[in-house]
C-alpha cells in the first residue's frame, strides 16, 4: 500500500532551545536536525543561538563553535575544512552544500536550518549513511581500464584530450548533487545519480581508457542513466561548480551515436 | 476478383516510386536534423551558462534520436542508407553562425535563417 505520510517515528519534532550566550550583541539563530537512533524516539530540531563575533565566517566554524562551546553531543563529519574532502556536505538553509566553504554572506537573513543530506538514512544528527552512494560510485569502475600492456613510464595523453576531463575530475564525492535530485530520491537504488554518472563520463571520454563499449553496456538500462530528466538541481548545488546534468546528456549522446 | 486485380496492378506499379519518395523523405529528415543541430550549436556561442548549455545538449540529443529513428525506418523500408549523413552538423556551421549573428542584431527573420536555403559546405 502506498504510504503518503511519514511513519510516526520519522516526524521531526521541536527539540531543545539552548540559552542565548550572555552579553553577545551579534546573535544568530540556528535550527539543527538532531537524531540518535540508539536513543530511540523521533528526530528533533534543536535551536542554538550563536555569537557570530566569536564563531568565525563559515557554517563549519559555527558547527564547531556549537560543539566546542554549547553542545558537545552534536555529531557531523568534517575533515579538510577547505572544500577538498567533501565530508561536511549537508543541507544548509534548504540547499545541499559543504559547510566549510559556505559563508554567512551567502545565506538568507533569519533562522538558518541545518539538516543532513536529504533522502539518505541518518546515522546520527548531520551524518548520512552513504553506503549506497559509494557502491554506485564503485559500480562505474572509476579507474583506467586497458587491454594493451602498460607502457614503461606512463600512459600519455595530448593536451586537448586532457582538457576534455576539465569539469569532471574535480568532483569531491560530497553527494550534494545526488541527494538533491528527485529522481535519485525516488529511485536511488536503481538510478546511479548525478555524481556516479559524472564519474562514469569522466572515464568514458578519457582518451587512455579502452573499455568505452563495456562501460556504456553497464549503463544501458532504463534506470541507471535514463532517470535523469535534466531538472539541473545537481548543477545548481554542486559546491565545486560542476555540471553533472551536462555529463549525463553527453553519455546519452554516446549511447545514441554507438547505435546509429 | 477482376476489379481487385485492376486495382492491385496500378498500386504495385506505383510502389517503387512511393518507396523512393519515402527514402528521400527520410534522408531529408536526417539532413534537417543536421541543420537543426548546427543551429543549436550556433545559439550557444554567446551563452554557455550551465542550464542553457545542458539544454542545448538535450536538444542536440533529440535531433540525434530523430536521425536514428529515420535511419531505422529507412532500413526497414529497404532504402539504400549509404548516402545518409547522420551527425554531420559541421557542414552547416557557416550558415548557422551567419543566422545566429543576424539574430544577435535583432534580425529574427533574416534570410540567412531560412534553413531550406542552407547549403552544405564542402571540405577542402
Image: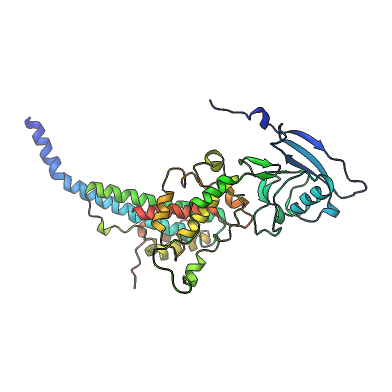
Query: In this picture, is A242 found above or below B19?
Result: below
Q: Nearer the viewer, residue B49 or B29?
A: B49
Residue B48: % across, % down? 55, 59
Residue A251: % across, % down? 45, 54
Residue B14: % across, % down? 16, 44
Question: In the rendered view of the protein, which quadrant contains the C terminus of chain A?
Answer: bottom left
- Residue at position x 69%, y 41% in the image: A124
Q: Is residue A39 left or right of residue B55?
A: right
Instruction: Count the marks.
Output: 0
Q: Nearer the viewer, residue A69 or A3?
A: A69
- Residue at position x 34%, y 64% in the image: B120
- Residue at position x 90%, y 49% in the image: A24
Q: Which of the colour schemes (rainbow, by chain, secondary structure, one colour) is used?
A: rainbow
Q: Quadrant of residue A4?
A: top right
Residue A85: % across, % down? 65, 57
The answer to whether residue B113 of the structure is visible from this angle is no
Q: Nearer the viewer, residue A138 or A116?
A: A138
Extreme-right residue of the structure: A23
Extreme-top residue of the structure: A1
The answer to whether residue A100 of the structure is visible from this angle is yes
- Residue at position x 49%, y 42% in the image: A190
Q: Is residue A41 left or right of residue A20?
A: left
Query: In this picture, is A85 found above or below A115?
Result: below
Q: Is residue A136 left or right of residue A41?
A: left
Q: Is residue B95 left or right of residue A168?
A: left
Extreme-left residue of the structure: B2
Query: In this picture, is A63 found above or below A165?
Result: above
Q: Nearer the viewer, residue A170 or B89?
A: A170
Amino acid at each position: 500500500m502506498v504510504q503518503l505520510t511519514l511513519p510516526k517515528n520519522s516526524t521531526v519534532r521541536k527539540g531543545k532551545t539552548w540559552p542565548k550566550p550572555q552579553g553577545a550583541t551579534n546573535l544568530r539563530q540556528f535550527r539543527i536536525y538532531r537524531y540518535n537512533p540508539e536513543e530511540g524516539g523521533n528526530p528533533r530540531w534543536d535551536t542554538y543561538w550563536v555569537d557570530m563575533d566569536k564563531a568565525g565566517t563559515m557554517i563549519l566554524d559555527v558547527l564547531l563553535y556549537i560543539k566546542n562551546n554549547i553542545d558537545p553531543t552534536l555529531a557531523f563529519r568534517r575533515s579538510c575544512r577547505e572544500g577538498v574532502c567533501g565530508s561536511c556536505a549537508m543541507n544548509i538553509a534548504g540547499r545541499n552544500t559543504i559547510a566549510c566553504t559556505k559563508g554567512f554572506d551567502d545565506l538568507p537573513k533569519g533562522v538558518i536550518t541545518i539538516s543532513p543530506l536529504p533522502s539518505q538514512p541518518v546515522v546520527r544528527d548531520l551524518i548520512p549513511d552513504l553506503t549506497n552512494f559509494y557502491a554506485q560510485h564503485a559500480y562505474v569502475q572509476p579507474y583506467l581500464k586497458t587491454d594493451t600492456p602498460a607502457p614503461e613510464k606512463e600512459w600519455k595523453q595530448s593536451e586537448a584530450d586532457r582538457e576534455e576531463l576539465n569539469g569532471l575530475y574535480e568532483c569531491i564525492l560530497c553527494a550534494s548533487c545526488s541527494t538533491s535530485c528527485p529522481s535519485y530520491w525516488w529511485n536511488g537504488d536503481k538510478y546511479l545519480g548525478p555524481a556516479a554518472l559524472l564519474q562514469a563520463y569522466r572515464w568514458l571520454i578519457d582518451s587512455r581508457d579502452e573499455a568505452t563499449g563495456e562501460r556504456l553496456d553497464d549503463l544501458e538500462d532504463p534506470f541507471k542513466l535514463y532517470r535523469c530528466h535534466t531538472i539541473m538541481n545537481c548543477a545548481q548545488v554542486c559546491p565545486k561548480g560542476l555540471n553533472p546534468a551536462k555529463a549525463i546528456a553527453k553519455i546519452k549522446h554516446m549511447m545514441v551515436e554507438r547505435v546509429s | 476478383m477482376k476489379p481487385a486485380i485492376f486495382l492491385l496492378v496500378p498500386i504495385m506499379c506505383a510502389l517503387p516510386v512511393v518507396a523512393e519518395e519515402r527514402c528521400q523523405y527520410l534522408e531529408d529528415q536526417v539532413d534537417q536534423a543536421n541543420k537543426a543541430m548546427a543551429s543549436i550549436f550556433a545559439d550557444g556561442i554567446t551563452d554557455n551558462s550551465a542550464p542553457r548549455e545542458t539544454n542545448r545538449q538535450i536538444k542536440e540529443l533529440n535531433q540525434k534520436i530523430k536521425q536514428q529513428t529515420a535511419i531505422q525506418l529507412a532500413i526497414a523500408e529497404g532504402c539504400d542508407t549509404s548516402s545518409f549523413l547522420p551527425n554531420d552538423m559541421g557542414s552547416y556551421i557557416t550558415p548557422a553562425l551567419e543566422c545566429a549573428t543576424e539574430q544577435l542584431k535583432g534580425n529574427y527573420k533574416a534570410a540567412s535563417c531560412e534553413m531550406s536555403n542552407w547549403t552544405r559546405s564542402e571540405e577542402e
